[in-house]
Image (cartoon, rainbow, N blue to C red):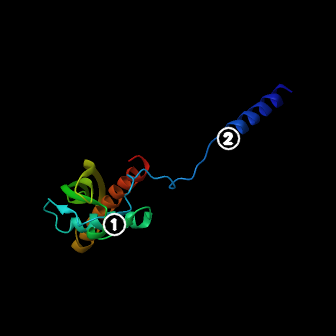
Amino acid sequence: MKGVFCRVLVIISCSLLLGSCGYQMVGKETHVPEGMKALAVPTFQNQTYEPGIEILFTRAFLREFIQDRRVRVVDRSEADSVLEGVIRYYYVAAVSFDRSGLATEYQATVTVDLTLRKGTGEVIWQEKNLSETRWYRVSSNNAATSEQNKNAAVAQVGILVAERLRNRFFSNF
């Protein structure tokens, strides 16, 4: 009898706890400054020696804001705000080796500075040293595959930084 009473008490307690949990729709509320309706994302500046990295990052940020749809992504001439990015640091290091000592995996690290400005040029928000790292495999007998894997890893870094920024942008600006 005592065991049944305990089970009933646990079930009631769990029901009360679960029933009192508050849920709300995510993504409806936005903390973007008032009046910001149209955003431009010009091509990022590349201050590294890695050619084309600015294209991968710019694409990732454009895709993230276009898919989100809370702010229209437009040309700079139509924008009331501009998100500027500067790729400050790009580093690749071997992290895994085969028995003969050849690298089989590398890690790519990219660091970016971001600035959100009003159309007038006034800085609304700035974040320096946003960084992500991704690993990728290389092939000793296929340089093209190794290069594709590196580009995919760098693109993934851009996507992760863009997602992180979008979450900050709309959640706790």
Where does the image place residue 108, in percent across and percent down from the top left? Answer: 25, 57
Q: Distance between the residues labelled 2 and 1?
A: 39 Å
Few, some or many C-alpha atoms within 10 Å of disc 2 (few <14, some 14-19, many ≥20)?
A: few
Foreground of the two, 124 or 134: 124
**Residue ranking furthest to the right:** 1
Point out the tag, 2 or 1, that comes first from the N-terminus.
2
Image coords of residue 118 (percent x, y)? 28, 56
What's the residue at 38%, 57% (across, down)? 35
Circle 2 — which element?
Answer: helix
Mark 1 is on which residue type?
A: Leu
Q: Nearer the viewer, residue 134 or 58?
A: 58
In the shown orientation, is residue 137 left or right of residue 52?
Answer: right
Which quarter of the figure has residue 138? bottom left
Q: Position of residue 62 (x, y in %)?
A: 33, 66
Residue 137 shows in the view = no
Circle 2 residue: 18
Residue 171, label in figure = none
Q: What element carries label 1?
A: helix
133 sits to left or right of 31: left
Q: Is residue 85 visible?
A: yes
Contact between marks 2 and 1 (CB within 8 A): the answer is no
Quarter placement of the N terminus = top right
Viewed as shown, does residue 81 lie left or right of 90?
right
| Residue beneath the point at 58% across and 49% down | 24
Amino acid found under the numbered disc labelled 2: Leu
Label 1 belongs to which residue?
62
Q: Which numbered disc, 2 or 1, marks the residue closer to the eye?
A: 1
Direction top: furthest residue = 2
Vertical arrangement, residue 23 with respect to residue 157, above or below:
above
